[in-house]
Amino acid sequence: MIQDGTSGRLPANIGRFARLLRRAGIAIGPGDVLVAAAAVAAVDMASRTQVHAALKATLVKRREHLPLFEQAFDVFWRDPQLRERLLSLLLPQVESERTPDGRKLARRLADAFAGDAPPPPPPPEEKLREETRIDASLTWDATERLKTRDFEQMSADEAAEARRAIRLLRARLPERPVRRLKAAPRGPRIDLRRSLRGQIHTGGEAVALARRSHRRARPPLVAIVDVSGSMDAYARMMLHLLHAMMQDAGQRVSVFLFGTRLSEVTRELARRDPDEALTAIGRKVKDWSGGTRIGPALAAFNRRYARRVLTRNAVVLLVTDGLDRAEDDSLSRAVERLAHLTPRLIWLNPLLRFDGFQPAARGVRAILPHVHEFRAVHNLTGLEALAAALTRTKAEADPRLEAWRRGLRADDPAAPIRR
């Protein structure tokens, strides 16, 4: 007999499915579950497509939750070994686990289902000594694994541990000579005014010449961060690094976020508590986890903020995956203009985590010719490398960057190439 959405075991299963999604981070209330059950009752239960559409329409409220819902639906409503498969993701050999259609399961989904798992049975007494020795070795493995784990695949506990590690990173830019001068006994320049003033005080007798040299100061750091749906997890970790740098005395940092429009969040991120800072940013930035318009956002930065914040050889971090769908060349012109305003434009792209990455996307091909450095920021190792690179005046260029530029040049001989 075919069940409707209000009888049999189906309501209970819809409730279990909703709890699974809620633990994975999707906001679902009791009212949503009742609406989902009513929606399923209104469609043909024999049609998997209609049930899928009914649940998606009633349980998914935000675009970034859709991939998680799709994975959960595929496994929950198809695979009778769901519990065993998801719990297996918690083991160290999780990397090869995939759904029947070949996609990797989200770590958040595995953790969500683990909430229903019964506590493991106590180990046999005779094996206790051996297991203690194994746990000690796995502690080191877990630390190393956390450093290389993709931010998007981290569980809630791992993300909290990663944020604590990020707060310990130090990324002070090196000091550079600036235009202003200061008194220096052995400076290369003669301070004529101070020397003549000294002669007046001594009645015209010869005195030692006063000298001066250039002051030294750290250049400002300007971060322009993409907070669209595909960059959500990486943008949050990047903001934690920028918050740590802002709390470091002597380092001036300006932060701008963009999805479909540009927003300055320097004042909000300057709050001492990082959670309060991100909450204030969330209230201000309304297009977080939405679409992205990189070209117009960078053009707005060049037009409204560049003159104020790009001073004293400021270093610019451009954090985006470069997935822009604009059909015109506004992105290329905006990045080229930005590159002329700074001596060091660093592009941080999480897509570099893929070994087979190629600059095939239109936005990537528009940005690549103009940047000075190209780095990955998808895990703690990438952020540590970035922090180390910022402490140097100039970092070594990624050899792949030159190869990709040559490829772009071969495809379009008229394309500008930065040396």
Image (cartoon, rainbow, N blue to C red):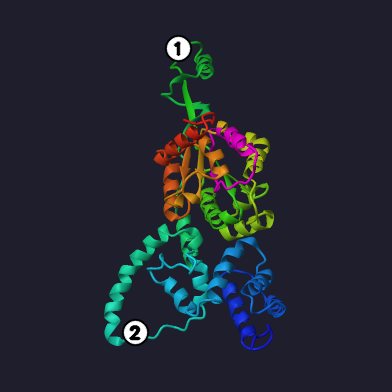
The span from disc 2 to disc 1 (Cα, nearest Å) is 90 Å
Q: Horizontally, is 168 left or right of 40 in the view?
A: left
Task: Say whether residue 21 is visible.
Answer: yes
* The one of 51 and 131 positioned closer to us in this rendering: 51
From the image, tell me which residue sits under label 2: 123
Residue for point 60% across, 33% down: 337
Residue at which label 1 appears: 206
Residue 280 is situated, as x and y percent measured from the top left of the image, at 65, 57
Question: Residue placed at 45% from the left, 39% from the top?
Answer: 404
Mark 1 packing: few (<14 Cα in 10 Å), some, or many (20+)? few
The amino acid sitting under disc 1 is Ala
Judged from the image, the secondary structure of the residue bearing numbered disc 1 is loop
Task: Say if the magenta span includes residue 334.
Answer: yes
Q: Is residue 219 magenta?
A: no
Which numbered disc, 2 or 1, marks the residue closer to the eye? 2
Circle 2 sits in a helix, a strand or a loop, which is it? loop
Q: Position of residue 79 (x, y in %)?
A: 50, 77
- Span highlighted in magenta in the image: 312-339
